[in-house]
Image (spheres, grey):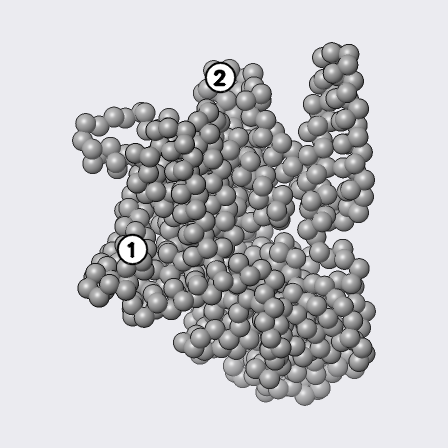
Amino acid sequence: MLRWAPYPFVRITLGFIAGILLYLNSGRDFSYSAEVLAFFVAAYLVAFLLARRYKSGSVTDVAGILGLLCFVAGGLWATHLHTELHAPNHLLHLQNPLAYYVGVVDDYVVQKPGYQRTVLELEQVQVNGIWQPATGKVQLSVPHDSEQPYELTYGDRLLVKGAPQPVPAAQNPNQFDYGAYLANRNIFYRQFLQAHEYVKLGSEPGNPVLYLSIRWRRQLEQLLREKIPARREYAISSALILGVTDELDNAIKAAYINTGTMHVLSVSGLHVGLIYGVMMLVLVHFRRTPRQRLLAAIVAILGLWFYAFMTGLSPSVLRSVVMFTLVTVALASGRRTNIYNTLAIAAFALLLYNPYFLLNVGFQLSFLAVLGIVYFQPRFYRLLAFDNQLLNKLWLFFTVSLAAQLVTLPLGLLYFHQFPVYFWLANMVVVPLSTLALYTGLTALALVWIPVIGPLLFKLHFGVIWCMNELNTGLTHLPLALINGIDISLLQTVLLYVLLILVILFLSLKKLRYLALATVVVAILAGQEIAEVLQQKQQQTLAIYNVRRATGIALVQGQQATMLADSVLLHDEGNYTYNIQPHLWHLGVPQPQFVSLEGTPVADPAITALPDSNRLVVWQGQRLLILSHPPKLQPKSRLPLDYILLRNNVRLRSEDLQSYTSEKVILDASNSLWYRQRLHRQLDTLGIAYYDVADSGAFVLELGSQY
């Protein structure tokens, strides 16, 4: 039987998490959460007093259950408090459009190619010529040359012209929902500004400590830029040491993601742990008496928070620093402490500060990885013993990597749809080198003022990063280095974790009922997979995707697909990966056959190249005319079609559209806004039904049904 008594804070944190999830799945509108919390607190106090008075075991059990429900209600209440859209003067509730608004930059400024992005916390808005107070956050993007100093900084007070627009939901099936991601940060609006559409009114940083931390990080970032002229190595150095990932291009990110080592390029638990380990090694001789342990703990905690301050107090660093701070306090107390309780306290503190951290992928993976390392790594490590110290160290790295990968695997498959086969080898190579790179980089920054030693350390730091990057890139070229296209549902993810827990219970408690339950879970997962494959083999889907300034059309037959694409999409792999690939993976299509809509037509029985360079698709009984050029063919009678796709601002006359009979005219996102608005009016006048992909999202036709 599983005993919960040694894990009181685990119970409390799980109850609090249950309250957060209950709120998030109740429509994020639980206005009576405070009353619910008050009710359970009062009920618990009554039950607690009765239990003490009558010494009744059953009443004590009821008091315990009510105490746990207090934390569930606490999770409800805390999440409601952190959901800003319920404020009566929130931007979401304004009826009339804004002319101007005033706000303060309340987040880090992210540098992207050609522009900078940040978040503005609203103070006032002007509606119908009248200024009024307002709340809410707006994501702002402003043009900026990445080689120049930052245009904006935390605390800048801005006057902005125009009205921000709601952040749209995902525009393609199974696409990453950026709107939901921003909503979890209480951001529901965004605006793309030109330089003349805003003006700085001054600086009013809400948090002076964060303001100073960000300024210092920028100075260190500039110092690294000066000392490491190679752009790739500078990008990795700034990410590794300071957590600044702005300069990492897609090629670098892909290389580290594909080997399962992306965690080394974002300051997190690994980096904080390495710094903590060095401090513990230095302070090992000063922890013999309780007074020395207290002093060593204070020094270690100050060192951790100094590093957090140096990295701009980013959430990922704060998460790890809070965790190690609590571990340090527990060790300094001199009493035997349970690491699971310590981790639970850290999670509870962070979620109490912001319940929406629970939806953060980094938060989920970080705590799961630590749990995996704490539980599995010692057990794996004891399986083998080597007399050789080098082999022991390699085995240690392997078991740490294996433990973390095992526990984070289901979540990694859910979010990233891939499995890096050589994660164990990559971590044995990249983690030691990234450790050396971190130590040399921090030492170089600390000793930069010394004429000879400073430059020498920066050269050593550069060399380590170069070797790490070259070796990591080489690992991506090994055969079968990456298995991608894996698509699992949230339910399957939960079932995989249930399976893992049942296997742990069986191995630790030696009870056959856990093995039987694990077998049932495996059967459910296998049944779901078989049913999904059978359904995919019968599917017939036509999809016209919403890809900005591009055309992408998928003809899916079973687990194969033909992708009709223009040159914009064919030459932009990132556009395809972000907008289209998740849907095809969901349909069981690992890689489509690409067919260009331009140039020499490809031999495909479903696609006919017309003399005027347009295309006619006849597929599964559906007839789709793709007009990229003004039609020159005038049929004697109205040509029956199912759909007409207008792309790339094709010039048309009214009589051109009247030459066909079609169920619907489709406008894709390769057309400009002015063109689509003009066609809307023209089609409305002609009484022709239409579907605008840029406004309504991807057009998907499944065996005659559409959504």
The disc at residue 443 is: 1
Q: Position of residue 463 (x, y in %)?
A: 23, 59
Badge 2: how crowded within 10 Å, few (<14), some, or many (20+)? Answer: few
> Considering the numbered disc 1 on the image, is that residue within a helix, a strand or a loop?
helix
Badge 1: how crowded within 10 Å, few (<14), some, or many (20+)? Answer: some
Q: Which residue is painted at 50% across and 30% down in the image?
A: 340
Q: Which residue is painted at 21% across and 61% down in the image?
A: 453
Q: Left or right of 442: which side holds 245?
A: right
> Considering the numbered disc 2 on the image, is that residue within a helix, a strand or a loop?
helix
Query: Alpha-carbon distance for marks 1 and 2?
Result: 48 Å
* 619 relative to 22, above or below: below
* 643 relative to 650, above or below: above
Q: Which of pointers 1 and 2 lies earlier in the amino acid sequence?
A: 1
Q: Amino acid at mark 1?
A: Thr
Q: Which residue is mark 2?
A: 509
The quarter of the rendered structure image containing the N terminus is: top right
Q: Amino acid at mark 2?
A: Leu
**Which image quarter: residue 161?**
bottom right
Let me know if residue 545 appears in the view: no
Let me know if residue 209 appears in the view: yes
Q: Which residue is painted at 40% across and 67% down in the image?
A: 219
Q: Which residue is painted at 52% across and 55% down in the image?
A: 582
The quarter of the rendered structure image containing the C terminus is: bottom right
Q: Position of residue 58 (x, y in %)?
A: 74, 14
Q: Position of residue 317 (x, y in %)?
A: 47, 50
Q: Position of residue 248 (x, y in %)?
A: 40, 63
**Which image quarter: residue 449?**
bottom left
* 214 relative to 355, above or below: below
Count of numbered tags? 2
The disc at residue 590 is: none
Residue placed most toward the observer, 531 or 499: 499
Residue placed most toward the observer, 252 or 338: 338
